[in-house]
Amino acid sequence: MVAGIDGCAGGWVVVTVEADGGGSRSIRRVDNLTGVVADLDRGRLGAVAIVIPIGLPEKGSRRCDLAARKLIGPRRNSVFSAPFRSVLGALTYEDAAIRCRAVSGKSLTLQAFGILPKIAEVDRLMTPDRQRHLVEVHPEVSFTVLAGAPMSHNKASPDGRAERLLALGGAFSDVDLDAQMRVRGTSPDDILDAFAAAWSARRWLAGRHIQLGGDVDSRGLRMEMIA
């Protein structure tokens, strides 16, 4: 089994699928990643792909973020720059912005600040050894590789959801937004992204993935995205 994870309100949505492409799957919401990581460490999951930055720069941009923007073209604005490691621990946006400006002269985006606690949670759990099985993905990169071209519409629009469902249909034969994607505390977009991550986790385990970036941060974590 492999899992794809995306953040949702107050927690995470986890989509678990068969590694060999079989039909068995589950969709659930969890408050934290402790149980998922325990399943990974015990071998109950072969790979996990998560929509969150892994590996944080001390300064400058991560190569994987730059490569992702180039790859997905019209959807490039969905890839925000990962925060600097020195920003972790900031409790207010003002504090985070001050820390960011001290390194780059620029402020932190509100989007990045909004998921800072999730980035910190993943960073606490990550080790270079665990990264052999737990990898970073970006859903728009995964959808682009899966469909063979960048998505044409925003994922929150009806057309955007429809084209992402169509793309996922090539990997998961019976993904149904109405029947399967009503998980309390999540949105359809969260679950679509988690399915895309699960598809990438399956490719990672099979060695059929593509890799963007790969430079190493101060903790020895690879700053890369896979799809």
Image (tube, grey):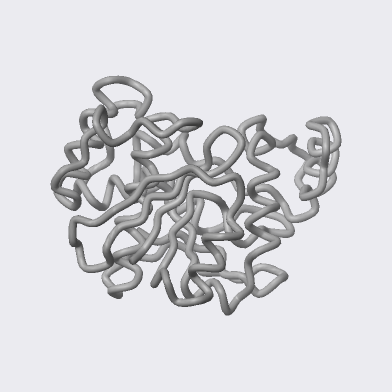
Q: In this view, does 80 lie to the left or right of 218?
A: left
In this view, 100 is above or below 209: above
- Between 126 and 95, the one nearer to me in the picture: 126
Q: Which residue lies furthest to the bottom in this view?
A: 129
Q: Could you say where residue 28 lies in the image, as x and y percent from the top left?
A: 43, 45
Q: In which quarter of the image is the N terminus?
A: bottom left
Where in the figure is residue 91, as x and y percent of width and height?
83, 38
Residue 97 coordinates in the image, percent (x, y)? 79, 35
Residue at 45% across, 59% down: 225
The residue lying at 82 percent from left, 42 percent from top is 90
The mark total stands at: 0
In the figure, is residue 201 to the left or right of 108?
left
Q: Nearer the viewer, residue 141 or 213?
A: 141
The x, y position of residue 112, in whole percent, is: 64, 38
Q: Which of 100 and 203 is in front in this view?
A: 203
| Rendered residue at 37%/43% (across/down) | 140
98 w.r.t. 122: above or below = above
In the figure, residue 106 lies in which quadrant? top right
When asked about the image quadrant of residue 199, the answer is bottom left
Is residue 122 found left or right of 154 in the rendered image?
Answer: right
Q: Which residue is drawn at 33% across and 34% down?
A: 181
Q: Which is more toward the observer, 148 or 127?
A: 127
Vertical placement of 204 versus 36: above or below? below
The quarter of the rendered structure image containing the C terminus is bottom left
